[in-house]
Image (spheres, helix red, strand yellow):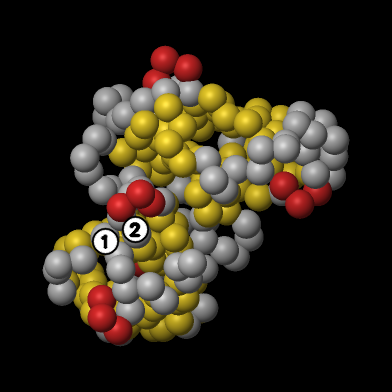
């Protein structure tokens, strides 16, 4: 069974440019999470989806970050415009309904110059 | 606000040693606690999950304990191997309206040398 797929794996952009990350969760996993992980820190939740509904986006900086999960499967996280402080690893995870274990993708490492 | 702290930040041991990683959390009203492993450049892999009603979970050479009242969990690794080298993260799930929102510690970087 394929795991959580994320692309791209690495992205280097200049500040003020837009960037988008894509996540394909494990088949059948209705719950999808986006996390931000700064160097030397644990991940921090940005947004959680149940199917296509964002049920917790309280940690998402809505002035520059946006996310969508059309059709309740794939998801895209966007930053516009990117700032130097956005350099981090963006992780996507998914889980089955009614279960507690989250399965993580390899992440996208973003570098903003 | 839940805060999770892991001690030590880094640990280097010779192969074969038994070791303990520590995790503490400030709010004891948790739903469950998970231990994850993260290899460089990769995502997180769930190792053990302990529900709030449980005291410990075991998987192979790994044993995780939970003392909810004192806000502590430990991950015990027996007979460590070089392949155990990774960053170990603990995360608490608050449950309720915050179900699924994991609060992570900063991790313990483990190096097991031959």
Q: Which mark is residue B47?
A: none
Left or right: residue A25 compared with residue B68:
right
Q: Position of residue B8 (x, y in %)?
A: 47, 82
* Quadrant assignment for the C terminus of chain B: bottom left
Query: Visible in this render: residue B70?
Result: yes
Subunit bearing disc 2: B
Q: How many other residues sit within 10 Å of disc 2, few (<14), some (14-19) or many (≥20)?
A: many
Which residue, given by chain and number where applicable, does mark 2 sit on? B93
> Between B42 and B1, which is closer to the camera in this rendering?
B1
The residue singled out by tag 1 in the image is B32
Q: On screen, B99 above or below B69?
A: above
Q: Quadrant of residue A68?
A: top right
Mark 1 lies on a secondary structure that is strand
Residues under numbered marks 2 and 1 in contact, where contact means CB atoms less than 8 Å apart: yes
Residue B15, position in %: x, y? 34, 79
Q: How many marks?
A: 2
Q: Is residue B12 visible?
A: no
């Amino acid at each position: 069974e394929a795991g959580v797929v994320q692309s791209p794996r690495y992205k280097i952009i200049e500040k003020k440019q837009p960037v988008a990350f894509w996540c394909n969760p494990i088949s059948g996993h209705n719950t999808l999470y986006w996390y931000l992980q700064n160097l030397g820190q644990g991940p921090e939740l940005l947004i959680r989806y149940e199917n296509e509904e964002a049920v917790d986006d309280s940690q998402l900086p809505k002035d520059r970050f946006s996310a969508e999960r059309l059709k309740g499967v794939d998801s895209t996280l966007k930053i516009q415009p990117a700032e130097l402080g956005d350099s981090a690893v963006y992780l996507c995870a998914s889980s089955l309904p009614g279960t507690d274990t989250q399965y993580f993708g390899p992440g996208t490492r973003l570098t903003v110059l | 606000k839940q805060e999770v702290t892991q001690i030590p930040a880094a640990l280097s041991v010779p192969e074969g040693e038994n070791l303990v990683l520590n995790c503490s959390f400030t709010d004891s009203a948790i739903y469950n606690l998970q231990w994850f492993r993260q290899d460089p450049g990769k995502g997180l892999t769930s190792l053990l999950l302990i529900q709030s009603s449980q005291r410990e979970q075991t998987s192979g050479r790994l044993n995780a304990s939970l003392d909810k009242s004192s806000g502590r969990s430990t991950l015990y690794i027996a007979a460590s191997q070089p392949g155990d080298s990774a960053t170990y993260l603990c995360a608490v799930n608050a449950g309720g309206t915050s179900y699924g929102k994991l609060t992570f510690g900063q991790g313990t970087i483990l190096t097991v040398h031959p």
